[in-house]
């Protein structure tokens, strides 16, 4: 059984920084790992994605240059370093796992990030 859990959300002032972590338990072959976010009244959107097979990284345009995704293969963990945060970054951030050679995906329960004075 696969479990995905995020940590590291919180309240930060504009211009501040936060680091999110996502750990995956259960031994499964992974194709990609990443972060999505969903703000109130909006659809869930991709923030950053890393391909485990190719190493390619994709960022949403709005976070390029401010957010950095990284992964630790040994710990089966990914991180999202968020700098220069803006109020529009406020959302619930979800960890996403795409299984290799399968249509299966896995989601964490989400962690709240609030950027406000």
Image (tube, rainbow, N blue to C red):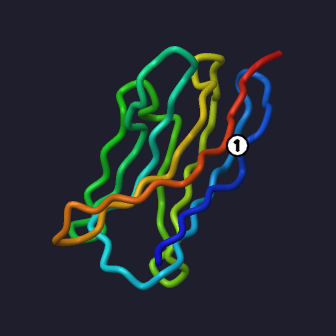
> Circle 1 sits in a helix, a strand or a loop, which is it?
strand
Q: Position of residue 70 (x, y in %)?
A: 48, 60
> Which residue is the extreme one toward the left?
101
Residue 79 quadrant: bottom right
For the point 40% across and 44% down, which residue is it? 48
Q: Is residue 62 left or right of residue 38?
A: left
Q: Position of residue 57 (x, y in %)?
A: 31, 52
Give the residue at mark 1: 18
Q: Is residue 20 left or right of residue 102?
A: right
Please give the count of numbered marks on the rendered protein. 1
For the point 77% across and 39% down, which residue is it? 10
For the point 53% across and 77% down, which residue is it? 25
Location of residue 41 with respect to 34 vertically, above or below: above
Q: Is residue 34 left or right of residue 108?
A: left
Q: Position of residue 88 (x, y in %)?
A: 58, 17
Location of residue 19 with respect to 93 vertically, above or below: below
Residue nearest the observer in this picture, 49 or 95: 95
Q: Is residue 105 left or right of residue 77?
A: left
Looking at the rendering, in which quadrant would you find the C terminus? Answer: top right
Q: Position of residue 6 (x, y in %)?
A: 62, 56
Residue nearest the observer in this picture, 8 or 71: 8
For the point 33% across and 58% down, which residue is it? 105
> Which residue is the extreme one toward the right?
117
Location of residue 13 with respect to 58 vertically, above or below: above
Local packing at callout 1 (Cα closer than 10 Å; few below 14, some 14-19, many 20+) is some
Location of residue 78 with respect to 16 vertically, above or below: below
Residue 83 quadrant: top right
């Amino acid at each position: 059984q696969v479990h995905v859990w995020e940590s590291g959300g919180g309240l930060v002032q504009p211009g501040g920084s936060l680091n999110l972590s996502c750990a995956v338990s259960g031994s499964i072959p992974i194709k990609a790992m990443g972060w999505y976010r969903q703000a109130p009244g909006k659809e869930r959107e991709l923030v950053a994605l890393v391909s485990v097979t190719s190493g390619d990284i994709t960022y949403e345009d709005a976070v390029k240059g401010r957010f950095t995704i990284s992964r630790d293969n040994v710990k089966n963990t990914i991180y999202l370093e968020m700098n220069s945060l803006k109020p529009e970054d406020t959302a619930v951030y979800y960890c996403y796992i795409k299984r290799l050679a399968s249509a299966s995906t896995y989601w964490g329960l989400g962690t709240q990030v609030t950027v406000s004075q």
